[in-house]
Image (cartoon, helix red, strand yellow):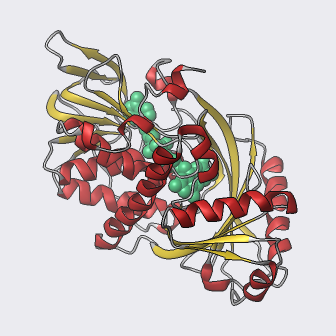
Amino acid sequence: MKELHTGRLYWPTTLAVSRNHTSLKENIKTTVAIVGGGMSGVTCAYVLASGGMDVVLIERGKIAEGSTSANTGLLQFCNDVMLVDLIKQIGRGPAETFYTHCKKAVEQLAAVAQSLPVDVGYRDRSSLYFASSEQDLPKLKKEYEALAACGFDVEYWTPDKIALHFPFRKSGAIVTHGDAEVNPYQFVNGLTDAAQLAGTRIFEETDVNNLQTLEDGIHHLHTSLGYTIEAEHVIYAVGYEPEELRGRLVKANLNRSYAIVTGVQSHLESWHKRFMLWETARPYLYTRTTIDDRIVVGGLDEETEQPVHSQQTISRRSKQLMEKLLALFPDIQPTVEYEWSATFGESQDNLPFIGEDPKWPNVYYSLGYGGNGTVYSMIAAHLLLDLIQGKGGQHPLTEIVSLSRASLTDS
Ligand SMILES: Cc1cc2nc3c(=O)[nH]c(=O)nc-3n(C[C@H](O)[C@H](O)[C@H](O)COP(=O)(O)OP(=O)(O)OC[C@H]3O[C@@H](n4cnc5c(N)ncnc54)[C@H](O)[C@@H]3O)c2cc1C
């Protein structure tokens, strides 16, 4: 199994009991087989099963223990690629459509999280996106204008306004309303229960090691234990393991990132309305709080795929993240309680890979590469539901995120 994270993760410690699912020990048939039991696969299973489809979900290890458990749980409609840059890249209409659907996906995630019978740490939040330097200010202002013109609920904050609400001063910031935070591990576990209730058959410890398509178009997924899943449609939701797709299609850069979670803070009064904070620099620093009054900080991305094994290196990076946090909030006195490093994937054009394989009918991908992976998971679930039910042409993002889009084939 590929190692996707190292260190001490926080989210798995917050779930008292996680349900176990058996491994597959017989041959079965289904309409849709989903490979991968992380955020992407489980969201897809939930949406498809709730849409009345017969779904089987297969996870090689345990549900939510891939990069989903290293996810820092910010749900934002603004992307790693700023709207002004995306407009240059794909044109105003498609860029605004993409951003609008990211917003819609955050709302869909909210509706699902709030419908679960357990609290999964979901809270509505606003975000403060600040200029990392004076040089970034003109672009930040243009971004504000582009977001406002697109109808998003955004504000532009001056240095004085920032300093009025936070113990730091920046040369400018955009405040976006309508974002949210979640505990990704609790969310995916809760969603797995809901997907199962909706009829999904779930198998853990079941490794799909081969996919064979028969002449009649039916797919046979073979597991390492020698069983077969016969499926009309197959969705790969294998996260940052593009090697699982045997070199097909995906043009991605795999990096590694770092995150820390502090001990419980008794004083967070200086943290205005628990905003989620991030910045214009790339790679960027980001930080948020949790419902049990901890602080999550992430960033320091490096151009290496392998998560770090040396405790010394992880501790050094944690110290750097802590210093950046203290530069923003000198009044708090946090200690690092959890720290990890994790593989992080970005596509070459900053858009996720969602859709049908152009050369392999009824094989689909839900690969939400980028910092908004959770939001992309929800977009993918609805787009794939439409595609499988034969309504693909109607989903406005089909061309923008497809695996045969121009930006992937041209480069
Ligand atoms: C440090 C960090 C912070 C992040 N922060 C955020 C954030 O704040 N907000 C956000 O939206 N996103 C964030 N992300 C991105 C987010 O974590 C990912 O987009 C998301 O978790 C990926 O989910 P997934 O289901 O695609 O992948 P995974 O969770 O990795 O799940 C894929 C699963 O597929 C299984 N699998 C693979 N091959 C097979 C096979 N052959 N047979 C059976 N099973 C298989 C794996 O075992 C794995 O469990 C962050 C990522 C990192 C690393």
Q: Position of residue 384 (x, y in %)?
A: 29, 40
Q: Quadrant of residue 135?
A: bottom right
Q: Position of residue 260 (x, y in %)?
A: 70, 62
In the foreground, 374 or 131: 131
Could you tell me which residue is drawn at 48 percent across and 54 percent down?
99
Q: Position of residue 270 (x, y in %)?
A: 73, 87
Asked if 197 appears above or below 21 in the picture, the reply is: below
In the foreground, 180 or 183: 180
Residue 209 in view, yes or no: yes
Could you tell me which residue is drawn at 15 percent across and 30 percent down?
28
Quarter containing the C terminus: top right
Q: Position of residue 174 (x, y in %)?
A: 66, 70
Could you tell me which residue is drawn at 82 percent across and 72 percent down?
170
Residue 279 in view, yes or no: no
Side of 83 where 322 appears, left or right: right
Residue at the top extreme, as displayed: 215
Side of 118 where 325 appears, left or right: right
Side of 225 where 312 appears, left or right: right
Q: Quadrant of residue 86?
A: top right
Q: How many marks?
A: 0
Side of 157 where 346 appears, left or right: left
Q: Quadrant of residue 252?
A: top right
In the foreground, 243 or 19: 243
Could you tell me which residue is drawn at 61 percent across and 80 percent down?
274
